[in-house]
Amino acid sequence: MNISDIFLLLVRWIHLIAAAAWIGGSIFYLLVLRPSIRKDSRYAKLFTNTTATTAAEFKILVDTSIFVLITSGVVLTFSRLNSNVIGIPYVIVLGLKILLAIWMFILAKNRRHNRLISDRKLELVPTKSKFYVNVMRSVSGYNSIVILGIIVFLLSDLLKIFYELALD
């Protein structure tokens, strides 16, 4: 193992840690923190008071993760594309992974500035349409970032398989 192999190993590790921190934090928020606060009204006021602080801290994590993912992703992409063993399926999956990652970055940036469907707008929607609104909320914002993140993790594993098969 030479110096460039060790460098690429560290870059892959940092890339994985950044992705896991962002998507893992989002999963924790969606599946643990938010539901537990909604179940007990005693925590509603506490949640309102700490939401801004929590969001600010998580924003720092997300911004750092995005920077690390872009930087390490560029290094890893050029490393693999220069290996001369990858094929067309690898390039297609890599392109899809990059597009989904860019979509995630855009969603994260836009999420800070406005929500697709706010609670105030939800109150104005007729009862018959609330199902549609609830469906839209479930696939927007942080939910869509988590869904896309899980898909990106899957694509990463697929890329690893394609690369290993190309080495044989």
Image (cartoon, helix red, strand yellow):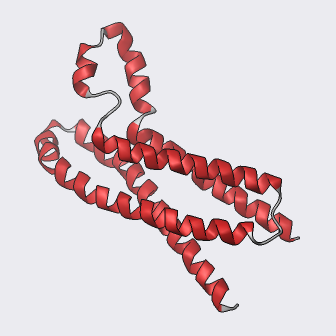
Picture mark count: 0
Q: Is residue 141 visible?
A: yes
Quarter of the view holding residue 87? bottom right
Point 45% across, 50% down: residue: 105
Find residue 42 and report its horizontal and vertical position in percent: 12, 40
For this view, does 149 lie left or right of residue 135?
A: right
Point 50% across, 63% down: residue: 69
For this view, does 56 lie left or right of residue 48?
A: right
Which quadrant would the N terminus be assigned to in this image? bottom right
Find residue 78 and report its horizontal and vertical position in percent: 66, 68
Q: Nearer the viewer, residue 84 or 122?
A: 84
Q: Is residue 151 visible?
A: no
Q: Nearer the viewer, residue 121 or 38?
A: 121
Q: Nearer the viewer, residue 130 or 55?
A: 55
Q: Is residue 44 above or below residue 97?
A: above
Quarter of the view holding residue 126? top left
